[in-house]
Image: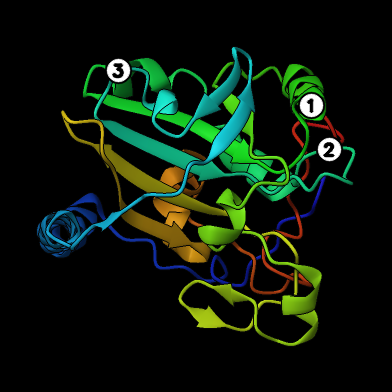
Amino acid sequence: MATVTSSALKDHPVVSHEKWLAARTAFLAKEKEFTRLRDQLSRERRALPWEKVDKAYVFDGPRGKETLADLFENRSQLIVYHFMFSPDWDEGCPHCSFWADNFNGVDVHLNHRDVTFLAVSRAPLAKIESFKKRMGWSFKWVSSGDGDFNYDFQVSFRPEEVKAGKAFYNYKTYMDMTDREGTSVFYRDKAGAVFHTYSAYARGIDLMNTAYNYIDLTPKGRDEDQLSFTQAWVRHHDRYSGK
């Protein structure tokens, strides 16, 4: 297990309950303002323009071949988690797996708000199913295979793009990897037309990780500043040593 160290706890102020309550109440005002700002940001996100999806994407899933429209499962809204799992890998990305450990069970609640949730990767379905079983996950996960879906939604990059420095990720050109993480949202109208409404990448998907939101409440926080890279501590949940 990674050792957590932090200088933030040394000589931390300790006060009476009255002073603690005063400080907490003052901070509550900032939290409420943040909540109002986040609500406003969400309204502005929903007001963003959409783009129509005309390409016929086909996925390999537990039920066989499915189109993008099929993935909605008779609902009007679809959330896709772009899970990093390249066809030549033997297991999914440990960092995407950290996110996916927060997905189980949420789909039934989303279904009751007219939302279907699933993950998409380029790896073949057999590898996905094997890894999913190992991890104990129940959410739906399909393969985009060698189709254009991952490339069109800027989470996979062809070798020539990476080599030329032209891989486009998180709304700028700089990626030096063949696959990255992200979340995309789609809407299907009553006529069956599908629209791409939103995509977020990198730190833009932090809110989808419940564990990080809990960690952010703790005295040490994420405590990643001194690591060799952000999330250097993360492992597949069956690969941690100790408790």
Residue 91, disc:
2
Residue 115 position in % (x across, y down): 29, 27
Residue 136 position in % (x across, y down): 69, 17
Name the front one of labels 3 and 2.
3
Residue 131, disc:
1
Contact (CB < 8 A) between labels 3 and 1?
A: no
Left or right placement of residue 205 versus residue 95 in this view: left
Residue 181 position in % (x across, y down): 59, 55
Q: Secondary structure at mark 2?
A: loop
Residue at 75 percent of width and 47 percent of height: 93
User: Where is the N terminus found, in terms of image quarters?
Assistant: top right
**Distance from Cα at disc 3 to Cα at disc 1:** 28 Å
Q: Amino acid at mark 2?
A: Glu
Q: Quadrant of residue 7?
A: bottom right
Q: Secondary structure at mark 3?
A: loop
Q: Is residue 169 above or below residue 213?
A: below
Query: Which color scheme is applied?
Result: rainbow
Q: Is residue 28 above or below residue 121?
A: below
Nearer-N-terminus badge (3/1): 3
Name the front one of labels 3 and 1.
3
Nearer-N-terminus badge (3/2): 3
Contact (CB < 8 A) between labels 2 and 1?
A: yes
Nearer-N-terminus badge (2/1): 2
Q: Amino acid at mark 1?
A: Phe
User: Where is the C terminus found, in terms of image quarters?
Assistant: top right
Residue 74, disc:
3
Q: Amino acid at mark 3?
A: Asn
Q: Is residue 190 above or below residue 136?
A: below
Q: Is residue 222 visible?
A: no
